[in-house]
Amino acid sequence: MTEHKKIPLPGEGGPGESKESSLLERASGAFGFDSFKPAAMPGKLSERPMKRAKKVTRKGAEAPVAEPVAQAHIATEVEPAANLPVPAAAPAVPAVVEGAPLAPVFDGARHPVDRAHLRDQGMIDPDGPVSELLEEFRIVKRQLLGTAREKGTAKSRRILVSSPHQDEGKTFCASNLAIAMAAERDTEVLLVDADVANPSILSTFGLPKGSGFMDAMANPDVPVEDLVMGTDIPNLWVLPAGLNTNSASELLSSGATAEVLDRLTVGVPGRIVIFDTPPALAASPAAELAKHVGQVMLVARADKTGRSAMEDACQLLSACDDIKLLLNAANFSPSGRRFGSYYG
């Protein structure tokens, strides 16, 4: 064992080392650690030959002789071809976003409305004095118009009028609501008879028969605006029920419904569309149309419509999230409000 005194000190220059060598290097020279050094790594490994896929030839054809693969130099930049013009940058085309299409203007022939026939049915006379009935529907229309203006969408301007059962006054309320709304300034009202099985809007106003809503639904080539009927009541238009078909529910559940209703309301903020539909518990068209309207006015007749019927009707019309209840034929007012006594 070598004594530590015999280990060369720094700067003494032992065999095989320089004066600047470290302590470990001098110990390696003294004890012969050179045999434990790893083998030297080659500077460059030999490349393995590249395998080429054999070319498949048809039977009987002479197989081509494979040419030796030469090691090619991969260029990092592609030189442009000489004498070729550089294409000019194309101008940027601005993106054009089209607005909502405007609903067509109603320009159908106007028909006179029998005012005496309206009075005989106990309805609002558009040319008569202010009455209790008119004031009642003025209050009703204010809530409906307020919601439509607050939301400001085409769907909110579509109002569905229905009742749980028949003979509860839905057509009476829908017609009076349309007359009251038509008196508004800058407002156009379209009353749609969507009760295909039992249409009554034309007879209520004394208008002639004609094609209507179901004809436009059944035939996409028929523009619905061409079937709208004008009246001599300012701002009031009527769309008859039209074709009496047994597949009204299937037509209303098709994609054509949204297209037809958009042609009536989209782009015209001053147009209100009122649908007089069949009773909700008697036929399915009311539930189908509820998917396309923004407001529902559910009519209940005093002392006749039951609570369970109202709950079932609300459930069927729940596709619309805004359902308002209207009590019809009520002889008692808890608030004591009597408009008729004020106006005489």
Image (tube, helix red, strand yellow):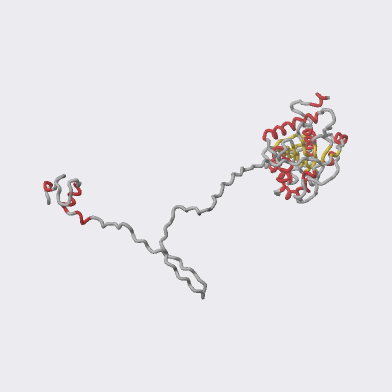
**Picture residue at 79% right of the left edge, 35% below the top:** 235
Dividing the image into 4 quarters, which one contains the C terminus?
top right
Front residue of 193/23: it is: 23
Q: Position of residue 186 (x, y in %)?
A: 76, 32
Query: Which residue is situated farthest in the front direction here?
Result: 83
Query: Which residue is situated farthest in the right direction here?
Result: 116
- Place residue 289 in its image quadrant: top right
Query: Which residue is situated farthest in the bottom direction here?
Result: 60
Query: Which residue is situated farthest in the top direction here?
Result: 342
Q: Position of residue 145 (x, y in %)?
A: 72, 33
**From what the image shows, is residue 288 above or below residue 328?**
below
Q: Position of residue 218 (x, y in %)?
A: 76, 50
- The answer to whether residue 118 shows anywhere in this view is yes
**Picture residue at 53% right of the left edge, 53% below the top:** 84
Residue 270 as seen in the image, left or right of residue 128: left
- The answer to whether residue 296 shows anywhere in this view is no
**From what the image shows, is residue 140 above or below residue 41?**
above
- Place residue 91 in its image quadrant: top right
**Picture residue at 52% right of the left edge, 53% below the top:** 83
Front residue of 335/283: it is: 283
Q: Position of residue 164 (x, y in %)?
A: 74, 41
Front residue of 69/237: it is: 69
Q: How many discs mark residues in the rendered view?
A: 0
**From what the image shows, is residue 67 above or below residue 253?**
below
Residue 14 as seen in the image, left or right of residue 298: left
